[in-house]
Image (cartoon, grey):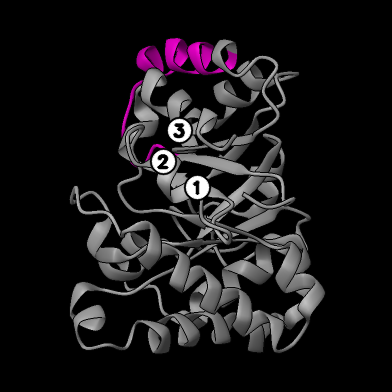
Amino acid sequence: MSERQPLVAANWKMNGTLASMKPLVDAIKTGLEGSDVEVAICAPYVYLPELSQRLQGSGIATGAQNVSEHESGAYTGEISTTMLNEFNCHYIIVGHSERRSLYGESDAMVAEKFAQVQSAAMLPILCIGEHLAEREAGITEEVVARQLDAVLEKVGIGAFSQAVIAYEPVWAIGTGLTATKDQAQEVHAFIRQRLGEQDSTIAASIRLLYGGSVKADNANDLFSMTDVDGGLIGGASLKAEDFLAICHATR
């Protein structure tokens, strides 16, 4: 790990109940007392009021998993940054691969969401990554560059001083497959170099998270790499013991 403060963000996805959430949050809070790792929990919208209240004063940030690119209006079923701000949301995931592949979010739409999050003074966690066929075709960097460039063209490099990027190889999400530490490092180094072409200071300071079947038993290896500054954790974030082990691995 570098001098960049590690960040571990939980993405509960569409899991849990109010009853299961409470002991999970309490166990995470207790397990992180005295820790210097930054932690965020990105929960389903309906749990944000309760989550925000339970995390108050804990140092753990509240996050959302998605947001509308629109500020308000006739968008039935959508949630705006203004609404999320009312529940002390600090982070918002944008462009998660499941949003891109299952719900057709384009690079342009993700860029709009990124801009919307920043306009509301919250921090976007921008997700980028390739599918298995793209990796096998040797175009991982091309795909990652395209996804990154769409946001750079919309907001400019300066916006990345207030953002986090999560590299998630789509083939490793929820599949049990994980990129090797060297594969993760290679793509993270490419992302940093790509940003560095426009601003070396921002490139050096931005936190790059790895997301893709991070578990307690592989977190140490992944987090030991120079350009891996933490993780975006899916399934393992639903078990306090596993999630805490991952958080502690950032040491």
Residue shown at 67%/71% (left/top)? 115
Q: Is residue 41 left or right of residue 77?
A: right
Q: CA distance from mark 3 to mark 2?
A: 6 Å
Q: What type is the residue that disc 3 sits on?
A: Ile
Local packing at callout 2 (Cα closer than 10 Å; few below 14, some 14-19, many 20+) is many
Q: Amino acid at mark 1?
A: Phe
Q: What is the x, y in percent for residue 86?
A: 71, 38
Q: Residues within 10 Å of mark 1 (few under 14, many from 20)?
A: many
**Label 3 or label 2, whichever comes before in sequence order:** 2
Q: Are marks 1 and 3 in contact (CB under 8 Å)?
A: no
Q: Position of residue 44 (x, y in %)?
A: 44, 38
Please tell me whether residue 118 belongs to the stretch shown in magenta: no
The rendered magenta stretch, by its main secondary structure, is classed as helix
Is residue 26 within the magenta segment?
A: yes
Q: Which residues are magenta?
A: 11-29
| Residue position for label 2 | 219
Badge 3 element: helix
Report which quarter residue 59 is drawn in. top right
49, 92: nearer the viewer = 92
Q: Are marks 3 and 2 in contact (CB under 8 Å)?
A: yes
The Cα–Cα distance between marks 1 and 2, rounded to whole angstroms, is: 6 Å
154 or 82: nearer the viewer: 154
- Which of label 1 and label 3 is nearer to you? 1
Disc 2 secondary structure class: helix
Residue bearing the label numbered 1: 223
Kindly identify which residue carries mark 3: 246
Is mark 1 in CB contact (under 8 Å) with mark 2? yes
Q: Quadrant of the C terminus?
A: top right
Above/below status of 109 relative to 12: below
**How far from the left and from the top, in percent, is residue 233?**
41, 42
Amino acid under disc 2: Ala
